[in-house]
Image (tube, grey):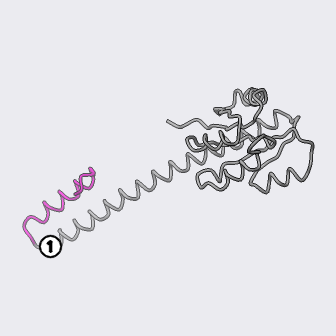
């Protein structure tokens, strides 16, 4: 069973969080809303996220500082961050956002359909990445099984070349054990 993608919504204003949750409603993503940078960092310790929607202007720890902490952590450095801000279209703020690792920077009011489309892309990438990781694990498991079987075939071949009375029976037993995964 695959885990549902999650979006971390970070804004100090509850009404903004509710608006973001409404915008994302209907997408294959679970919204997790927090009201501070500190709360976001704590949430990132316990959950994996496909995307983070981060308010740039917050009291105490602003979005830029929060993003900086997120990008320093090994576990979270690859999570895409989309900055959202009510600040005017100051190019310096956008550059600051990109400098701390944001993949996008949207100023309010923004088109909710554009935000939905961006979140959808990151959710899809997250799902595909999970699927690839699962397939990679399966391939590694199959490779290990193949190595065990190849070793058993090599050992059985060696036994069959021996001129011993029970070599045939030992080789058959070894191959059967390898086939059923009962190797010692």
Farthest left residue? Answer: 165
Query: In the image, which residues are magenta?
Result: 164-184
Q: Where residue 65 sits: x, y (%)?
A: 74, 50
| Left or right, 93 with reference to 81 | right
Residue topped by disc 1: 162
Residue at 12% x, 66% y: name it. 167
Element assignment for label 1: loop
Left-right relation of 88 to 16: right
Q: Who is closer to the viewer here, 166 or 50?
A: 50
In this orientation, which residue lies closer to the viewer: 63 or 25? 63
Picture coordinates of residue 14, whole percent (x, y)? 75, 28
Q: Is residue 163 above or below residue 20?
A: below
Identity of the residue furthest to the front in this view: 60
Q: Residue at x 56, y 50 (%)?
A: 132
Q: Quadrant of the C terminus?
A: bottom left
Is residue 183 found inside the magenta-colored segment of the image? yes
Q: Is residue 95 magenta?
A: no
Where residue 113 sits: x, y (%)? 81, 33
Q: How would you rate the neighbour count of disc 1 (Cα within 10 Å): few for under 14, some for 14-19, many for 20 or more? A: few
Q: Residue shown at 82%/37% (left/top)?
A: 114
Towards the viewer: 174 or 86: 86
* Residue 79 on image: x %, y %: 66, 48
How many numbered marks does the figure carry? Answer: 1
């Amino acid at each position: 069973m695959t885990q549902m993608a999650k979006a971390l919504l970070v804004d100090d204003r509850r009404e903004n969080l509710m608006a973001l949750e409404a915008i994302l409603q209907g997408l294959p993503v679970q919204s997790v809303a927090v009201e501070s940078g500190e709360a976001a960092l704590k949430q990132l310790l316990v959950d994996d996220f496909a995307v983070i929607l981060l308010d740039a202007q917050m009291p105490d720890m602003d979005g830029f500082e929060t993003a900086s902490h997120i990008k320093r952590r090994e576990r979270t450095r690859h999570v895409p961050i989309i900055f959202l801000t009510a600040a005017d279209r100051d190019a310096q703020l956008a550059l600051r956002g990109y400098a701390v690792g944001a993949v996008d920077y949207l100023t309010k009011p923004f088109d909710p359909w554009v935000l939905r489309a961006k979140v959808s892309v990151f959710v899809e990438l997250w799902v595909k990445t999970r699927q690839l990781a699962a397939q990679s694990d399966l391939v590694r498991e199959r490779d290990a099984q193949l190595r065990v079987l190849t070793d058993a075939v090599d050992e059985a071949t060696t036994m069959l070349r021996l001129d011993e009375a029970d070599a045939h029976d030992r080789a058959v037993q070894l191959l059967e054990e390898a086939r059923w995964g009962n190797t010692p």
